Image (cartoon, rainbow, N blue to C red):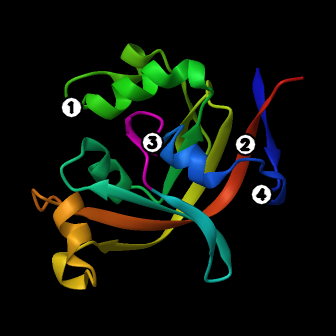
Amino acid sequence: MSFREISIDNVKINPFTAINKSWMLITAGNEEKHNTMTASWGTLGELWGHYVSTIYVRHSRYTFEFTENSDYYSLCFFDEKYRSALNFCGSKSGRDYDKDKEAGLTAAFDGAPYYEEAKLVFICRKLYSHDINRDDFIDKSVDDACYADKDYHRMYVGEIVRVLEKDEG
């Protein structure tokens, strides 16, 4: 099966359940070398006159260096039958494993690496990044609950430049 490009106006997912419950893969790098990680935090919306995604990557994650050194990243959404692949990609480091091989995923490239097994792909161009830090929390209980080890995320805002949907036909 292949993908077809669709207008973002035709995307038919609930971003709350797609990210929080179904999860997504954040992937960055190039055709020769890339890494992916499972995420259940993020947003989709409109900002600064662009349709955007906002992702959060901890500095300690191997994917961080790829996201940091790339102009683009992808967000891939999958059917439930890929839950074990997403579990693997969220619990093992690309420093130690070939995640694509171990998870049974096939990388493709269109400005950013993405996966042929995905049902929906957002290709995003980085617009902004900022480190989360304790001093910026208005409600310190969020910091206490989510950052006990003080391993803060870097937030990236990316313009959604292409949307690819699995062509089932």
Q: What percent of the width, then of the height, locates residue 80?
A: 58, 24
Residue drawn where x is 66% and y is 74% of the image? 50
The magenta span reads: 28-41
Q: Please, which residue is most extreme toward the right here?
A: 169
**Which is in the foreground here, disc 4 or disc 2?**
4
> How far, Cα to Cα, is label 3 from label 1?
16 Å
> How far, Cα to Cα, is label 4 from label 1?
34 Å
| Amino acid type of the residue tagged 4 in the rendering | Ile
Q: Earlier in the sequence, mark 2 or mark 1?
A: 1
Residue drawn where x is 36% and y is 29% of the image? 89
Q: Earlier in the sequence, mark 3 or mark 4?
A: 4
Q: What percent of the width, then of the height, locates residue 159?
A: 60, 66
What residue would you read off at disc 4? 8
Q: Which mark is residue 95?
A: 1
From the viewer's perspective, tell me whether residue 107 is left or right of residue 3: left
Q: What percent of the width, then of the height, locates residue 58?
A: 25, 55
